[in-house]
Image (spheres, rainbow, N blue to C red):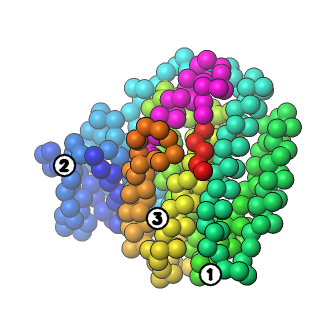
């Protein structure tokens, strides 16, 4: 099975017999057997025939649209997995403050542990004049208050503060050419943030597909509030995966010279990967998401692990038991 990414503006996607054909300007770029496609992501102004969209829906292949800058627009996905009983339970639990706080606390603790692990891992080989001990100490200090919180809003406040400290430290441990001072988005203002933004959009799509596959309502979360057009549950469940998948991947790319500053367009509108830079990034992402998740016992890829975690979360929801959900923690 393979993922299909179509990044060239003006490209077309159609079916020809048992193959999916991708072309541009009346020229066929490549063909892929339909049965081998697991998911498809299109960027910019890419056209796809309605008959092929129907084929993908019938086969359970999600189709996701992103802007050329990596902004998430939406996903078309088979809805046969919808479970109205799970949806009802999710809405019922919106009024259960104790459950929401306990589950949110569990997710945030896992996220923070993963962030600290990434910082420590990459800080081992820092030059003597670079030190992130203060940021790590401050993160630990803020983390100590998580157990005291009685409302989700309090937890989110501490989580936001920890994230600011984390990105401050992260910006110091990357190679100097990619250094940054804070997380910026919509638009990103530097190459590292540009890659984080695109990576998080890709990862968000993975989580969204896993949530829907598990029969859950993607717009009803426990930590992020209900909001029009916001898949709150996907925003909840992405948190534990950000550092292990995207942050570590982008750090690896800049540390191993897999990306250069020439792969970015920087202007008043923001900093974004070029078309060629985006292709290289997607190759790295596809390799990462399909690689084996070494932090769990069974031999599953990160993508498979995400689907498993979403089903585990669904079980915790249905039984109203937070102990049935164990967020990913790396070490």
Residue with the mark numbered 3: 68
Residue 76 visible in the displayed image: no
Q: Work out whether residue 67 or residue 155 is closer to the camera in this orientation and state it.
A: 155
Which residue, given by chain and number where applicable, does mark 1 sit on?
A: 176
Q: Which residue is mark 2?
A: 33
Work out how far the residue at label 2 is from the one at label 3, CA to CA, in angstroms. 26 Å
Residue 179, x across and y down, in percent: 64, 76
Q: Secondary structure at mark 2?
A: strand
Residue 42 versus residue 26 in the image, above or below: above
- Closer to the camera, 89 or 63? 89
Q: How many marks?
A: 3
- Extent of the magenta region: 302-326
Of labels 1 and 2, the one closer to you: 1
Using residue 149 as the reference point, say whether residue 174 is left or right of it: left
On the image, the x and y values in percent for residue 9 come to 37, 66
Neighbour tally class for label 2: few under 14, some 14-19, many 20 plus, Cα within 10 Å? some
Q: Which of the two labelled residues, at mark 3 and mark 1, occupies the earlier sequence position?
A: 3
Residue in the image at 81% along x and 66% along y: 134
Q: Quadrant of residue 136?
A: bottom right
């Amino acid at each position: 099975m393979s993922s299909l990414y179509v990044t060239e503006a003006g490209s077309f996607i159609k079916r020809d017999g048992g193959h999916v054909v991708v072309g541009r300007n009346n020229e066929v770029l490549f063909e892929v057997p339909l049965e081998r496609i697991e998911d498809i992501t299109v960027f910019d102004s890419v056209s796809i025939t309605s008959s092929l969209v129907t084929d993908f829906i019938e086969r359970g292949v999600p189709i996701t649209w992103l802007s050329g800058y990596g902004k998430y627009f939406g996903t078309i996905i088979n809805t046969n997995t919808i479970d109205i009983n799970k949806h009802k339970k999710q809405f019922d639990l919106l009024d259960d403050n104790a459950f929401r706080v306990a589950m949110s606390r569990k997710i945030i603790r896992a996220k923070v542990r993963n962030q600290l692990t990434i910082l420590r891992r990459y800080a081992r080989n820092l030059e003597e004049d670079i030190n992130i001990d203060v940021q790590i100490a401050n993160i630990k200090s803020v983390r100590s208050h998580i157990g005291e919180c009685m409302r989700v809003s309090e937890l989110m406040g501490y989580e936001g503060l920890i994230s600011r400290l984390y990105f401050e430290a992260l910006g110091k441990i990357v190679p100097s050419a990619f250094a940054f001072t804070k997380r910026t988005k919509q638009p990103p203002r530097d190459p590292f943030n540009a890659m984080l933004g695109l990576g998080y959009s890709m990862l968000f799509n993975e989580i969204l597909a896993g949530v829907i596959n598990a029969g859950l309502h993607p717009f009803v979360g426990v930590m992020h509030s209900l909001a029009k057009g916001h898949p709150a549950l996907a925003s909840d469940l992405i948190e534990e995966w950000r550092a292990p998948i995207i942050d570590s991947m982008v750090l690896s790319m800049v540390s191993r010279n897999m990306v250069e500053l020439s792969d970015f367009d920087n202007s008043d509108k923001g900093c974004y990967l070029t078309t060629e830079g985006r292709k290289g990034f997607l190759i790295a992402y596809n390799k990462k998401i399909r690689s084996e998740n070494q932090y769990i016992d069974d031999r599953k890829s990160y993508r498979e692990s995400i689907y498993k975690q979403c089903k585990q979360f669904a079980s915790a929801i249905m039984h109203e038991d937070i102990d049935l959900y164990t967020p990913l923690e790396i070490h």
